Image (cartoon, rainbow, N blue to C red):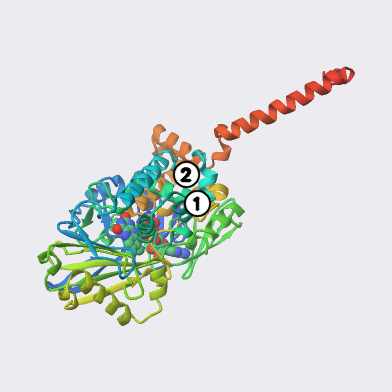
Amino acid sequence: MSEDQFDVVVVGAGLSGLSAARRLQKRNPQLSVLVLEARDRVGGRTVSKQLPAANGVDQWDMGGQWVSSSQTHVMELIRELGLEVFPQYTEGKKVHHVGGPHAKIKTYTSSMPSYSPLALLDFTQVMWRINHLTQNISVEDPMSSANAELYDGMTLHTFMEKYIWTTQVKEELALCSRIVFGLEPSQISFLYFLMYSATAGGTLRLLETTPGSGQELRVKGGTQQLSEKLVEQIGKERVRLGAAVMTICQNSENIKVTTSADTVFCKAVIVACPSHLAAQIRYEPALPVERQHLTQCLPIGHMTKFIVTYPTAFWKQRGFSGEIVVRPSEDCPLSVTFDATSPRGSPALVGFITGVQARDWCDKEMEERRDAVISSLVKYLGPEASTYIHYEEKDWAKEEWSGGCPVNVMTPGMLTYYHPSLRKPFGRIHWAGTETATQWCGYINGAIQAGQRAGMEVLAQMCPSSLSQEELDAVRASLKRSDPRKDSKCSSSKCYYLFGVVMTAAALVTAYLLAKPERGFEWF
Ligand SMILES: Cc1cc2nc3c(=O)[nH]c(=O)nc-3n(C[C@H](O)[C@H](O)[C@H](O)COP(=O)(O)OP(=O)(O)OC[C@H]3O[C@@H](n4cnc5c(N)ncnc54)[C@H](O)[C@@H]3O)c2cc1C
């Protein structure tokens, strides 16, 4: 095989692309695999950085950081790579400040902030409603769920206006939307919100630090190690950095992949980058219109993540956990913070500026943002917050090869009209990336699951003998589900519709034949 000829090319050395490459190699060591990465580093939306700290320097994640015991794919990878996790610190009072800058600042130690009896009733009824809907969503084929079109026609905001009675609970859910997606509730399809929650096993899991929830555990030494260790397994020479893929041309023989640096040829491609960046690659022949339309309408959230390191964990001494949830205001850019003390004991806080706040604050000078963040921390945790060692921030919208974070979401109508093209291969081009996951979509776990799934698709296509019959059946079933319109089964409402059409046609034909019996002979 020539130097520029490979069996499979993977676009993107984030966790999804690297998991795909690893799966291919592990199952069939004969396959030659090349990973092309636009950045000069691996890890994509996970990146760890050394920062000045109480212990000299220490390591923090500036991108994805938490994992959970319920996230089977990432937990298995962590075990396999010999890494360790530790629990998110949650002891002490949490700060809760909604209702605007002049509302009372509340603290609580239970799992929920204190609500008025009416707000508590409201919260309970809306969470019951959302959980009930989430449990009945098909994550593989959300359009087969009851009332799918109705829910995909409304935004999360529309749902909130319709079913939430109190301003306080509306505000809580809006905060959740900013913290989880980096977007306002009016920017997200309600059906998409339900599907996203369902991939995690429920909405509360997206928000909490309890066992099984999204913010349960951290990885010692940072999450970028997952990618770095995967590269060691795959082979450094098989991962090309600084190679932004610009075109992918398929013909009956080969696929030609052109990067900013060179051109390579292969038999199959896995595209493992955020959907809106996958759309910027030029494809020949052009992608099906359905796929093009889908990727035109998948906005990505906006978040700036910050880490503030301190000489002491003064918040713990004052009885705080470090968790603050606040409705951002003109003076306060942040939405949420947590304790981020390192496993070596260097005290730190981590926080996020999200949604419209991220937009409004992103063009200001870093010093202005930093000062606003620090004075908010002083307000909520005490004057010691002003004596920090280091402030570090990362605005992911300004990263050329991410364009935002944490995930691309779907606007109303996208699931209804274009969802099948999300995972459906186009010729020998397969789609990975956390956006295509069915377990913890949008998360590190989803990236790994989607990469492994795309790897299995390619193996099934190129060398089916490297898979068991059970695995082959699973790949075929998953591909079939990714195009539900090919499925002979139809949803109950469609079946009734079809039944109605057939019965009406039969009745008309019968009536016609009865009225003109002589014509009847022509049918035989
Ligand atoms: C601030 C922040 C906080 C987060 N918090 C968490 C968390 O706590 N827990 C959690 O589980 N998840 C979290 N996430 C989400 C998580 O990091 C992502 O879901 C996951 O890393 C996505 O992996 P991926 O491989 O699908 O995509 P990416 O990591 O985006 O990888 C895609 C790769 O493709 C490359 N690329 C793009 N275009 C091209 C091209 N044309 N040619 C070649 N290469 C290209 C990119 O440079 C990138 O390296 C967070 C993300 C951010 C940014």
Residue 13 visible within the image: no
Which residue is at the front of the view, 361 or 12?
Answer: 361
Which residue is at the front of the view, 491 or 18?
Answer: 491
Residue at 53% in and 59% down: 297
* The CB of the residue at mark 2 lies under 8 Å from ligand 1: no
Q: Residues within 10 Å of mark 1 (few under 14, many from 20)?
A: many
Dot 2: what SS? helix
Q: Is residue 168 left or right of residue 487?
A: left
Type of amino acid at the residue the image marks with label 2: Met
The disc label shown at residue 462, or none: 2
Q: Quadrant of the C terminus?
A: top right
Q: Is residue 96 above or below residue 464?
A: below
Calculate the distance from the C-alpha at mark 2 to the C-alpha at mark 1: 8 Å
Residue 384: horizontal and vertical position, in percent?
15, 75
Type of amino acid at the residue the image marks with label 1: Lys
The disc label shown at residue 192, or none: none
Residue 403: horizontal and vertical position, in percent?
43, 67
Which residue is at the front of the view, 264 or 59?
Answer: 59
Q: Are marks 2 and 1 in contact (CB under 8 Å)?
A: yes
Residue at 28% in and 58% down: 232
The numbered mark, 2 or 1, whose residue comes first in the sequence reads 1
Image-quarter location of ligand 1: bottom left
Q: Pointer 1: what residue? A: 267
Q: Which residue sits furthest left?
A: 317
